Image (cartoon, grey):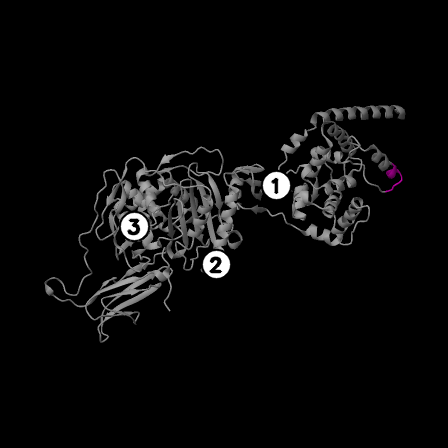
Amino acid sequence: MRVPSSIRCAVSNLAYGFAVLLLAESCAAATPSFTEVRSSHTPSDTLILDRHGEELHRLRTNASVRRGQWVPLADTSPALRTALVMSEDRRFYEHSGVDWQAVSAAAWANLWNSRTRGASTITMQLAGLLDEDLKRGSSGRSMVQKLGQTVSAQMLERSWRKDQILEAYLNLVPFRGELVGIDALSRTLFGKAPHGLDQREAAVATALVRAPNAGAAQVAQRACSVLKSLQPAGADCDALDLFTTAALQHRDYAASAGLAPHVALQLSRSTKTASIRTTLHAPLQRFAVQTLQQHLRELAGHHVEDGALVVLDNATGEVLAWVGSSGSLSNAAEVDGVTALRQPGSTLKPFLYAQAIAQRRITAASLIEDSGTQIQTTGGLYIPQNYDHQFKGWVSARTALGASLNVPAVRTLVMVSPDAFQKQLVQLGLPLKETGDYYGYSLALGSAEVSLLNLANAYRALANGGRTSPTTLTLATKPMWHTALDPRATFIVGDILSDANARARTFGTDSLLATHFWTAVKTGTSKDMRDNWAMGWSRRYTVGVWVGNASGAPMWDVSGTTGAAPIWAAVMQFLHTKQPSQAPKPPAGVVQVPVQFGATEAPRAEWFLQGTQQASFAIDSVAPYAHSTRAGGQKHPARITSPTTGTIIALDPDIPPNRQRVSFQAEGGDLRWLLDGKPLAKGASAQWLPWPGRHVVQITDAKGRVLDEVRLEVRGAGVRPR
């Protein structure tokens, strides 16, 4: 039986009407609010903010799409807003979601097979962007999708304002390739924020809405039409082809940009949010980056290209500045120098002296011999040198630490033991990989590897009376304290490192280390001049600086005061431009008494642990070098007494090579010294500027007969005399 067409039409119309009602009901229930849409927006980049919300860095974390930050309508170019409405929806502010006049025109045009603009409004397009079921397929939208789009648009208009619709559309519309939203488009193609787009740029952006992946010529043609609507008096489209081609080829939106790339990478791995607020302070971070790069440019002739810097808040452990590399100056800018492991050189000495003082093995006034000695280490016999070409003889522990003398430090480690010192360093947050026995006595001179961040935090423990807690990049993190060092010993060590007179023998009294406000500081250089450090603190801040090469290549003629120290001093000065730094108050259990040293050092007031103080420190007699005539008047053949055959001389990396000397001593009279067969000096002693390699040292009589010889090796970076 055949159903009449009138019944079929009635049933069809009834089903259509029923479908419309169902769609309307479902769309009304599913329509999201503007606030929900805006809050669910996820940029493809993560913003790193400083402690006050200022943007420090931007890092791309989504490789599948390029979506910028949500841009409020007020922050978009007026030219863009006008161009978009004129091009896509002229009656946007008049209709209620569906432009029925445009629908009629489109239907009439379809009837006569003539081309015209589609009837889809901005609101309808937004509805298609918000609902996955309404998104346009490769063959266009189906009739059901168009029906749903129409109903959804009307629902949006009932609950959203016009400005909210336009704002959401600009932030969600796909433009070209991976670019979604006006922020990503304007920064990628035009290298500017959306509020800065001019009429020509707005015309190109609007043209891409209609044909996102069209060729440059088609986009330029469409942009010209948009530009003419913006400039009725006569738009200039002559150069639009070249401009459009250049814009479509432009890629100015870097995946990573800003002042803190290493912090951004580290935090983005653990925190998946559009923005991350850190403890960093933007003005300080900016100054630190500029200062590091400026100083490294000045050191360019010394084969130095990398550096790192960290600033800690003493009270909280918050990281205030984190500069992981020298950026464009480096061939390994991606390496984070703040966390990379490097040899710290003499910067471990303060912890050693603090431990020895706490164990009452020495006091700050104890006399320790700085002499030409041979100390067995894992690398051979270590013969350190000092700035003034001579050993200092008997010096107080204050002078030994302040002037960074190596032999007294190793002698102190002999008293403490490498194993006990290694455990002390671990307590301070320096996770050494090996045992103390593995490093041996070279541990006193920084043979282990540590990171700048951990080393700076260990110095922060000195600033906090021996208490330490982990560092943090997150605000409102309560410090978890534990005591790692005796507070009395840390006070004495801090007093030594703030004493310009204590370091005067090596660095002078007017070096960069002497600030106009209270600070304590220590420099260090690793073997072969591969790493240079400046570590120090004021009452409120701890600053750590590393300078070197990420590749491990040695620097050329860079000392403790020319490498990292100028950067450290500049940052400290910046921190205390308006903020004073007073010397800490002595803790309970320390006393200060006048001390006499005889002829060794000038008298002074010295700090002691209660019960270890004494008023006089002196050496009654000092044994001279051996003579050729011994007790009883018996004479012996001339011979070299120092160094001995097989000696391995490790040049001190803290001292510039041209300032180092090796002392030769011999018994006998009327001697001549030869080095590798060439005349060196006359007499019972000689001073030699060492350079790396194996050498033969000989003494001869006046007739040139060889009386004795020794063979030695020099390791490290040195300079060969002209």
Quarter of the image where one finds residue 73:
top right
Q: Amino acid at mark 1?
A: Ser
What's drawn in magenta, residue-wise? 108-114
Q: Amino acid at mark 2?
A: Ala
- On residue 44, which mark appears? 1
200 to 682, vertically: above or below: above
Q: Are marks 1 and 2 in contact (CB under 8 Å)?
A: no
Q: Along the horizontal axis of the image, is 395 left or right of 565? A: left
- Of all residues shown, which one is farthest toward the left? 632
Q: What residue appears at the point 22 percent right and 76 percent down from the top-left corner?
A: 703
Q: Along the horizontal axis of the image, is 444 left or right of 218? A: left
- Cα–Cα gap, marks 3 and 2: 33 Å
Graded by Cα atoms within 10 Å as few (under 14), some (14 to 19) or many (20 or more), the crowding at tag 1 reads: many
- Secondary structure at badge 1 equals loop
Quarter of the image where one finds residue 610:
top left
Q: What residue appears at the point 51 percent right and 49 percent down from the top-left corner?
A: 289
- On residue 300, which mark appears? 2
Q: Position of residue 244 (x, y in %)?
A: 73, 51
Work out whether residue 393 or residue 133 is closer to the camera in this orientation and state it: 393
- Secondary structure at badge 3 equals helix
- On residue 399, which mark appears? 3
